[in-house]
Each structure stands twice: as C-alpha cells, then as structure tokens.
Amino acid sequence: MARFGRFSRELRARLWKPSVDEEVRRELDYHLEMLEHEFRASGLDPAAARAAALAKFGDTARIGDTCRDIGTQRDREHERSEWLAELRQDTRYALRQLRGNPRFTLVAVLTLAVGLGAVTTIFGIVNAVLLRPLPFADPDRLVLAWETTPLGRDFAVSEPDYLDWRERSKRFSAIGAYSFRTPSIRGDGGAERLGGFAVTHSLFTVLGVPPAHGRTFLADEDVPGGDTRVAVLSHALWQRRFGGDPSAIGQSVDLDGITHRVVGVMPRGFDFPSRTEIWVPLAPTLQYHRGDRRLQVVARLAPNATHDEAAADLRTIARDIATAYPSSNTGWGARLQPLREAYVTPQLQARLIVLLSTVAVLLVMACVNVASLLLARAGSREREIAVRAALGAGRGRIVRQLVVESVVLSLIGAVVGVALASIAIPVVRGIGGTAIPRLAEMSLDWRVLAFTLGACLTTGVVFGLAPALSLVRGGSGGTGAVDLLRGGTRTTSSGRLRNALVVSSVSLAMLLLVCAGLVGGSFVKLMRVDVGFAADRVLTGSVALPIGLSPADTGPGRYTRERVVMFHDALVERLEATAGVRAAAATNIAPFSGENTAMGFDPDGVPSERPGEERMASWRVVTLNYFAAMGIPLTRGRLLDARDRYPAPDAMVINETMARLGWNGDDPIGRRVKLSSGRTMTVVGVVRDTRHLYVDSLPPPTMYFSHAQFPWATMWVTVRTAGDPAVLADALRREVAALDPNVAVARVQPLMQLMQEATAEPRLIVTVFAIFASAALVLATIGLYGIVSYTVSQRAREIGVRLALGAPPRGIVAAVLSQGIRLAVIGVALGGVAAYGAAGALRTILFETEPTDAATFLGIGSILIAVAAVASAWPARRAARVDPIVTLRSE
Amino acid sequence: MTEPTELLHGTLDALILKTLAWGPRHGYAIAQWIETSSADALRIEQGSLYPALYRLERKGWIEAEWGLSDTKRQVKLYSLTSEGRERLAVETAQWSRFADGVARILLQPSPRTGSGRA
C-alpha cells in the first residue's frame, strides 16, 4: 500500500511538475497571502496587513533566491541519482542477458579480450620506451654533443676539444663528459669486471640527479694530479659488494690494483649512460692529443637558450678550434642531439608507431566482429525490443540499454585483456629487455591502464551503437513493432549492414595479415642473412688488462705493451691446448658487441679528390688465428702471420668492400695505405666481407691489424669450439685467472647470444606481429563464422520450404557457400588495396623485402577465402541436414 | 510576558521534522504549528522556514507533492520520509543530550550563593 502510495505520488509529480522558479513563487505567495489574511482578520486594514505580513515573513527576495538555489541543486541531484539508478538497472539487465547467452558472451568477450589485450601490451611498450620521461631532472633540456667528421658523421670528442667547449660555450648551464672504463674490482671473491665510466664531476650536475648516499665528485678530484682515486657506486653494486651498508662511504675498493675511496652511492634505478656499476673521475686534460677522440659529451641547455641557439654556438666554437688547430680539426664540426634520441632511435620510433597502428587495426577488427555478433543476435531480440517499445520505453532509453550492454561486454573483455597483457608483458620484456632501452621497466602502470579503459569504453560504444541503432530503426520504429508482435515476421533491413560488417572484417584481416606476412618474411630473411662468418659455436669474453694511465705509471700489476702482447699470446696458446677448442683468438671488438672503432684512410697515400672528405673504415686488432676462429675465408694474398711483429713493417688484411672502395677492382696486395692516425700500413691480404656492426646493414669496409704490432689492452677472446660453446665458459675464466688472478673476464657468452641481442629489436617486432597475425586470423574466422551461420539460421525456414519442395541439399549448401565466398572475395580485394597503400609505411621496418611482394598478397588472400568457405559450408550443411518438417513447425 | 526566544542554530530542522511527524503539511501550516505548539515561546522569522524546507527536501528527509489546500488552492505539501523519521530520532536524542548538559551546568548551585543557602 505504501509502495503504491509512493508510486502514485511519483506519478502525479511527473504529471505536473512546475519549474523551480514557479514552485518557489507559488509557495511564498501562498504563505504571504495567508499571513495577510490572518492580520486582516485581526482587524488591520489591507495595507497595514500587507506590511505586517511582509515584516513577519522576512526578506522575501533573499529567501526566494536561497530556495531557488537549493531547489535547482535538488533537481540536479535527483536527476543524477535517477540516471544512476537507471544505469544500475541497465547493467543488471545486461548482465542477465549475457549470462543467458553464455556462448555468445564467451566468443564476444574473448574477441574483445584479444583486441584490448593486444592494445594494452603494445601501448605498454610505447609507454615504457617512448612516453615515459627519462629519469633525469627536466630531461627535455638535455642534449648530447658530438664532433662531426669532415664527412658530417657524428663522432666522439677529444679531451682538449671538450675542455674548450666547456670554457667557451655560453648556451649550456652545465656540460659533462664520459668515457668507457671497465675496471676489475678485486676482493675476497676474486676479480670481477665492472661496467663503468670515467666521468667529469659535472656529469651529475648536468643530469640533475643527487646521490642516494655520500656525494659525487668534487671539482678538484676531476683534474690531473688531483685526488682522482675516488669512486661512486651504483645502487646494485653497493648492494652486491657492501650489502647496502651506508658505512661503505669512505671505505676503499681495489680497482685494477689501485685503491679507490668510495665517496657516494647513486639512487636505485639510476643508470647513465648504460649498464654502469661504477663511476670514477675522468680528469680531462689539454695535454691529450686533440685528434684522439673518445669522449661522449652531454649538456644541459641554459634556461634561456633554445636547442638551435646552443647548436649554432657550438658550431661557431668548433670552427674557431679548427682554425686554431688545423692539423687535427680541419673540417670537423659539432652537432647537438636531444638526449632522448639516444634512447629512442628514429627507426625504433617508426617501428613502434607501425606496431601501434597495427594494433589499432586489430582492435577495430575486434569491434567489427563483436558488432556483427551482436547484430546476428539482434534477430532473436527484435521481439523483446518491440515489446519494450510497445510498453512505452523511449527509443533513447532502448539504445542506451543496448549500449550499456555492449559497454559491460567490453569492460569484461578489458579485464580479460589486461590479464592476457600481464602474461604477454614478461614475454616482451624477455625478448627485448636487454636490447631496447628502458623496455625492461615495462609494466602495467596507471597510464597503460587508463589507456586501456579509454580504449575499452570507446570500443563498447562504437560496436554497440551500430547494431543498437539498426535494431531500433528496423525493429521497433513505426509499424515495425506492431508487425513483429502480430505476425513474427522478421525485418531484414539489417542484412546490408551485416554484409558490410563481414566485408570489413575480412578486409581488415587482409590488411593485418599482409603486413604481418611482409614483416615475417623479412624476419626470416634477417635470421638467414649470411653475416660472412660462422657465428655458431664461438665463445666470446672480454678481458681488460690494467695498463698504466701514463707511460710513467708502471705500478705493480701494470701491463706494458710487451706484456699485453705476451699475455694474449699465452692465453691463446693455453686455450688452444684446452679440450674441445678448435681455434682461439682475440680481437679488440667482437662482432655485434655494440662497439666500433673506425679511422680515415688514404689508399696509396693519396688523399680523397674532394678536400675534407676522407674514406672511413672500421678497424680491428686481431691475433693470428682470428680468421680461423671466426671462419672468415681468405680471398687474396695471405693472412696475418708470425712475420707481422714489431719491428716488421705494419701489415694489414682488408675486406672486399674496402678493396673495392680503395682500389676499385685493382689488386690491393702490396699497396700502402696512410691512416688518419699517421701510420702507414701495407695490405697483405683480402678476406671475405662480414657484417659485424649490424645484422641488417651491409658489411662496412674493414681493416684488420696484427695484435703483435698494435697491442690493445681490452680484448675480446673468441674461441671456436667443437661442441656447445657455453660449456667452455669456465675453462676460459680458469685460463685467464691462471695467467693473472687479478684480471677478470666479463660478458662470457656464445657469440650467437651477442647476435641475438643485436637482432632483438626486429625479433621483438616480428614476434608481436606474429601474435597479431594469429589473433587476426582467429578474429576473422570467428567474425565470418558468426555472420554466415546467423544468415543461414535466418534462412532456415526458407531452406526448409525448399527442401520440402524437393530442392537438393547440395544445391542449398552451394548457394550459401557462394554467398560467403563472394563476401570474402570483396573483403580480400578491399583489404588488398588498403594493404598496398599501408605497406609503404612498412618500408622502414622491412629487411630486403618489397612492400608489394605479390606472393604475400596472393597467399594471404587465398587463406582468407578458404577460411570464409569453411565458415560458410559448415552451418549450411547443418541447415540442409535438418528435417524440413521440424524447421517449419518450429516457426 | 517575556519576549519569545530566538531559535538556536540548527534546531529549526528538528522542529520541522517533528511537525511533519504528525502528518503532511504545507509551509504556512508548519509555521503556525510551531508557533502555537510552543505557546508562542519560540519566534521564527517565518520566511526562514523555506530554505530549511528546501534543504531538508534535498537531503531526502522530507518530500513534497502538490495538492489542494482547504481553500482549494494548489499548495506544496511536505511529508516525512523514512530517512526523515530516523533523522528526527537522532536530532531529538542530540537535542535532549544538549539540553541536559546545558541544564546540568546552569542549574548547578553556584558556590557563592550556594554556601549562603546551605
């Protein structure tokens, strides 16, 4: 009874509801009138009664205003709560609907989960690599400064040049330099090679990161002759060697036999430039040779300076230096580069953008599929909708209810999708974490989740709206509702929309699969690329011998040039005597280790015709057996051998590319080459080209020098083994320790592992693409199957009539099949055109594959049409098998 | 006769709720009822009733509907909701605690005059 009373009140309130203005005015007027009436009854004349009433009531204007404000607020809140109540109701209804159709729900949720999960994963990569700010103060103001070669290529900076830059530049608020230094730390547990850098004291100021404990370097610790034997530890090294004990500050560590004092510990996560465990002072000096360029320079733009101004300033300084020191600096310039670019190369950025667009296509495809599933289901819901419309539900309300249903669906999809992404993310990290900067810190953070939520809501509205509108228009508009209730006839106006959805689903699959096919094809080519040497069964490791910092520095354990040569000769000899070793050698830089040394050269001592343009070649110092250990065949002349020792004339072996570049087909054997360092070399042999910098770029011109003539303190050992190279890792460590217990081997790993790291980026992209491709194929199949089977079930009655009239079941199957195939062919054609247009954008990530590769287009097209055929034939056969009587009676 | 007392801040709400506990009423009737029930001891500026009514309605403690007055005029009739009934109980309890406390202090015999009486 109470409920009914309330209901009737609400009904009346809805029937007559004055505006707030009207409500307040009426109410106050009535009150005043009654007061006036009362005063008149007590004997006052009308004017006095009016005045008395107003006096007793108070300030009408103010009271009216207050009431109007509160009333407006009241109505707004009421609307909102009503809206929420309706939303709750819609949601409950939607959940009931979804529970009632578990098969539909499962397929739709999985489809959306695949789309949203993929989007989440890729956005996670983009977020980790591209969007997250660098972990330094105000990172957009940080720049790398390079010297540029006369050919305009970026190059490292010499110490005197750096010091001049620091002195003269006015557009930097701070400038710092750093150089690779990998000391071995010695202690109880034997020697351990550390990843480290010698840095100027200003580097930490430039980056704007204070230490977690202690301090960073002082200015007078960063000059020659100063107290340079100090070190700053990374958080990880501090944990490892000192157990995270704050009293580590002030303690000493033995680095390459020199006692250093620990002065500071950097915060967790601080890593600059990369994989750094220890920092020591660089102490740059003007006494160094100006042509010896080894420093990396990073600077912070002054608060009022733009990037261009600072770059122009630096170029002017470089020109002045070139004028003052023509022998070392003629033609050399300077360039600034945003620090961000050091982390995100333009190529990586292009690859990620391609990935993100691809995944967007995948999501659109998921939307199309769920929309078509919804539409297929709409058939069975037309009657329900018609009933609701007949009971007075407004068109807007029905659409809203349907959209709420699809949003609920996509929210469930998003939850499952995020679960999928949380499985995929560790895989992605595993593949690319070591090779792609900052990918290792990829996670589902709030930004990724917010993006997923946004994508999910958009998705829900997009795929829900089309079927909802079509239902309302076709199912309940005008006479439609009545017809439906009366005769159970079905509207077919959504047939065209359904066909359009099938076609777009197929064409999106075509687009995605063709792109995936092209990328996959280039990946296979990349994996099969002939690098020019046999990379399997080679073990590598890096050995750094402590050398004196100056010729006068001959402290205990220091290595002289002679001792460096002797050490490596002995090491190679010992390794070759080890069981399981085919050949052992050493080189200053292992292939694909991410390092390079290059120098200008003049064939026959003749400088390039164009002044200021010198020819550059990579150079490697190698021990005699290097070519045997790596499997690099000789094509001309001889290899380096025991003759090529000091003081014999400097000999070198070059690769074919360098022979072509220098002598243009003439025999280079016996020719002389003047290096930009001033040394003159004699070519004794030519070996095959090898790709040793990048797998996906052509072999660079390369010169090989004899280690006995060019002793080098930091060498990579390369050991060719008979079996699994990893087995010999301990033997390598043992032999090095046997020669000098204070020397440690770092980065002991099979060469294949270095190669894999070098190809990690393309491999990651392709793996992700492969996942997309399979997802796209699954989605296309589900979409196609859903639509076609629905169409067939719609035609069950017609099929029944035909069968009853004696039509052969096979003919019916053929008709359904041909309709499915026709739609698929249209989709494939449209998708093919789109893919042809999109493939151009793929050029940046393809490797030796044409974006218009016909085989890929035809192959993918036929696969999709075959899928369409299977998806059509299956339900058609089922329909044709049903007894026509059953079908006809069921209507 | 003493002057009617000004209402303490916040008590008007409680009075309105109590008034409506007897049954639905329009604004004017509420004002009348408060004045007569308190034997004219409480004086309210009648207009200030309305902001309080709107506020209470917004809070959902009372609800309003349009009905006909005795004089066949369209008037807004307020009635108590179940939330309002609960609220009234709370306010009543609060008020009696408050009044009790104040009374305890004010009615305590003061030390100076108290000793004289004792």
Image (spheres, rainbow, N blue to C red):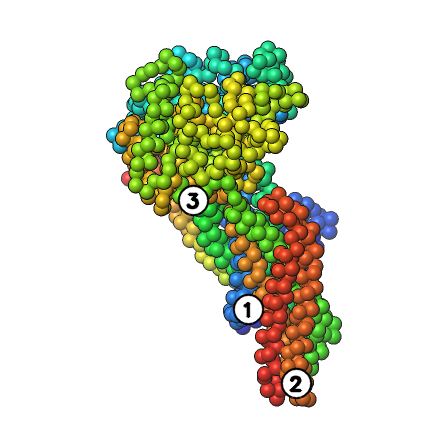
Q: Name the kind of residue labelled 2 in the image.
A: Pro
Question: Residue A534's image quarter?
Answer: top left
Tell me whether circle 3 and circle 1 mark residues in contact (CB < 8 Å): no
Residue A873 figure quarter: bottom right
Mark 3 vs 1, N-terminal side: 1
Quarter occupied by the C terminus of chain B: top left
Chain letter for the residue marked with disc 1 in the picture: A
- The residue carrying mark 1 is A104
Q: CA distance from mark 1 to mark 2?
A: 32 Å
Mark nearest the camera among 1 and 2 is 2
Name the element at disc 2: loop
Does residue A838 lie above or below A871 as drawn? above
Residue A536's disc number: 3
**Circle 1 crowding by C-alpha within 10 Å: few under 14, some 14–19, many from 20:** some
Q: Amino acid at mark 1?
A: Phe
Chain letter for mark 2, please: A
Using the rendered image, report if marks 3 and 2 lie on a common chain. Answer: yes
* Percent coordinates x, y for residue A73 in the rendering: 61, 51
> Closer to the camera: disc 3 or disc 2?
3
Element marked by disc 1? helix
**Residue type of the residue flagged with mark 3:** Asp
| Residue picked out by circle 2 | A808
